[in-house]
Amino acid sequence: FAPWSDPSAKPYISFKNVTKKFGDFTAVDNLSLDIYNREFFALLGASGCGKSTLLRMLAGFEQPTTGEIVLDGQNLAGTPPYRRPVNMMFQSYALFPHMTVEKNVAFGLRQDGMPKAEIAERVVQMLKLVKLEQFAKRKPNQLSGGQRQRVALARSLAKRPKVLLLDEPLGALDKKLREETQFELMDLQQSLGLTFVVVTHDQEEAMTMADRIAVMSHGRVVQVATPAEIYEAPNSRFVADFIGDVNILDGNVTRANGGTVEIAVDNGFTLRTATGEMPAEGSRAGFAIRPEKLRVTPRPPANASINAAEGEIWDIAYLGDMTVLHVKLKSGQVVKASSLNAVRAVEEPFAYDQDVWVSFDENAGVLLRD
Ligand code: ATP
């Protein structure tokens, strides 16, 4: 499933140069973005970056100041929320406290004037879907957080929208329940064949659930890609830093030709790589490398003149599944290196202050554009 890499595939939802201003403040800034049918799409970014505003414009609760939103070939301008094949599930769930679970789920259908028998049938179907049949007669305050979340989900799916918008859907759940619910949401999305657009500030959540992620900052999309691409090939310092842990090695570009780049890392060593865009000789560049891609060894590696630096063990953190080493390089920069304990057993253990070498393969990281 990768319609975004098929040039002939038509996007299902398109934001075209969408800007949203609140007074002088620009919440969404000339943003263009395509989402495909049946995609599980995540909008990821820090608080205030404009992701909820984007979702609310798709739902029809806000209008773009300029630009347009197209859904299934139709420009949505002027279409009120209830006439869009889109439904939104809010973080707060917004359940009616005085209504039973089944009444909550039936609410929207009643408003639409659906015949009673049909409503009853649909409600049973929806409660079955979220495994809450036996809770039909309860009120929200007689349910756990996770159950309430599922009622909200059943309610937002009851009208059979083509697109479900989820604004921080798991925000109120504890870690374990969040993880379970992430997989339930993925199953549901797959089995119903719907398009899900989820807003989250939690990168792990986005990585777990989404087919693709749009990383947002200040009302713009910085990168749109699959979780693996975003992690392995962040297109900027911002994305590299925002997703997961990263070490950024900065320096001056001393050579850039024939696909090979050499960087004199500040106060350090010579870095050579052949990945990423070619910077100009003499310019500054950064090389982003994940902790698990750094090797830490007590002795110098075979070719210690390239992609290898001396340092000392600064900190050792045992995290159960992995151990994270902080190594202070001769340059003064502290880098983070991690290794899975399951595969580390063959290595010798390190001690605080021990002199070590940090090395890496030339294509284990990426050059950053900015
Ligand atoms: P969060 O994760 O905190 O919800 P977000 O990325 O979803 O953040 P938005 O809710 O889209 O952010 O808000 C983007 C910016 O627009 C914020 O700075 C917010 O204060 C501003 N904003 C949102 N709605 C309005 C409004 N109705 N009037 C004025 N400013 C608004």
Image (tube, rainbow, N blue to C red):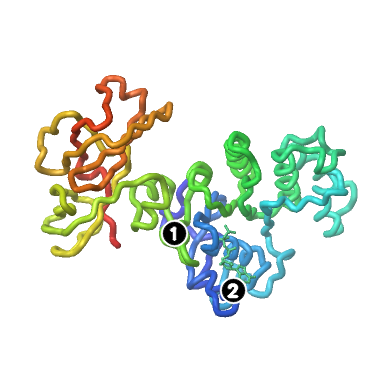
Residue furthest to the right: 116
Name the element at disc 2.
Answer: loop
Q: Dot 2: within a 10 Å radius of its alpha carbon, few (fewer than 14), some, or many (20 or more) residues?
A: many
| Along the line of sight, the residue nearer the viewer: 206 or 283 | 283
Q: Quadrant of ligand 1?
A: bottom right
Secondary structure type for disc 1: loop
Classify residue 110 as left or right of residue 326: right
Residue, disc 1: 8
Q: Residue at x 85, y 39 (%)?
A: 138
User: Cβ of disc 2 within 8 Å of ligand 1?
Assistant: no
Task: Name the residue beneath numbered marker 2.
Answer: 64
Front of the two marks 1 and 2? 2
Rendering quarter of residue 179: top right
Residue at (74% x, 64% y) in the render:
82
Report how many numbered discs are placed on residues in the image.
2
Looking at this view, name the residue that lies furthest to the front. Answer: 353
Kindly report the distance in space between the C-alpha atoms of the residues bearing marks 1 and 2: 28 Å
Residue 312 drawn at (x, y percent): 22, 36
User: 354 or 72: which is nearer to us?
Assistant: 354
Is 214 situated left or right of 194 in this image? Answer: left
Residue type at mark 1: give it.
Ser
Whether label 1 lies within 8 Å of ligand 1 gets the answer: no
Residue 253 % position (x, y)? 15, 59
Answer with left or right where residue 10 lies relative to residue 129: left
- The residue lying at 45 percent from left, 55 percent from top is 4
Question: Mark 1 packing: few (<14 Cα in 10 Å), some, or many (20+)?
Answer: few
Q: Earlier in the sequence, mark 1 or mark 2?
A: 1
